[in-house]
Image: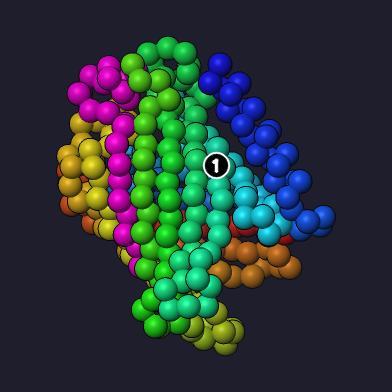
Amino acid sequence: MKRIILAAVLIIVITQSFAIAEPGKLSGAIGVDYTTKYIWRGFDVYNDKSAIHPFIDLEFGDSGFGINLTAHRANSSGHENSERWDYNLYYRNAAFAGERYQINYMFDYVYYNYPDMSSHTTKSIDLQEINGVFSFPQILGVKGLVPTYVLVKLWPSNSGTVVGANSPSGGTASGWAHIFMLDYGMPITCPVTNEERTLNLHTEFVYNDGVGPNGANVDHDWSNVVVGLSTDLKLAENLVFTPGIYHQIIMDKSVNPDKDETWASLKVAYKF
């Protein structure tokens, strides 16, 4: 029944978005991201194994509405039950445009579906989430330097499951997370091609308020810090290759018992 409801919501949102969007204004991207590890909010999802993440993103003109479908799959066996599909419905806009206190915001609903785990049994690990993303591109007075705050509310799709009330560890996927990010688009000149491009520097701090997406018993504490850099390389018209490298500093062993981790990302996207 929950999947039927989700499908109905998707159909309604897509239909309404097409109605709002001007003809010929549909835009988006389709592509795939390869990561040497899949680190998600501090959690090492596939235990140091590489993964692929195909995705499609559609935005409906100037309506602010969009949908995104992203899959996550390990490149090695033994993680079949951890394959995940993320279904996103979002709305983005801005307030006080051009002012020092301009706010770019996005509200997002996500359904995390694990297709190999039934949604109708106590073994289900499906999750749902709502989040709000608030960026302030002018507040610091430095071009390209943007602070962002993300508020996350996550909960199990079925409460009496291994990621909910029946978690063997006593943890739960239900709770809040707070993510504080700082991004800087630094203009550089490529030493090989002499082309002008932007080097994207990223930093984020995560406060996990007791959320264990896998049913783990997680502390209410600062969990991890991530730093990274990436850049966009134009391969052809509308085809972009984005290599990136990231390093995570673990602050709470209940989220990730491993040592600090480093991984790379290789993403190719066709934008239209």
Residue 149, quarter of the rendered image: bottom left
* In the image, farthest residue toward the front: 96
Is residue 89 visible in the rendered image? The answer is yes
Front position in the image: 99 or 15: 99
Residue 173 in magenta stretch? yes
- Say left or right for 127 vs 235: left
* Residue 57 higher or lower than 78, as above or below: below
Expressed as whole percent of the image width and height from the top left, the position of residue 248 reads 28, 56
Expressed as whole percent of the image width and height from the top left, the position of residue 235 reads 66, 68
Residue 125, quarter of the rendered image: top left
Front position in the image: 264 or 231: 231
* In the image, farthest residue toward the top: 121
Helix, strand or loop for disc 1: strand
Numbered disc total: 1
* Residue 149 higher or lower than 253, as above or below: below
Q: Residue at x 55, y 41 (%)?
A: 88
- Give the quadrant of the C terminus: bottom right
Q: Residue at x 59, y 63 (%)?
A: 241
Classified by dominant secondary structure, the portion drawn in magenta counts as: loop
State which region is magenta. 161-182
Residue 219 in magenta stretch? no
Is residue 78 visible in the rendered image? The answer is no
Q: Which residue is label 1 attached to?
A: 88
Expressed as whole percent of the image width and height from the top left, the position of residue 137 reads 45, 73
Amino acid under disc 1 = Asn
Q: Residue at x 47, y 33 (%)?
A: 112
Q: Residue at x 48, y 27 (%)?
A: 114
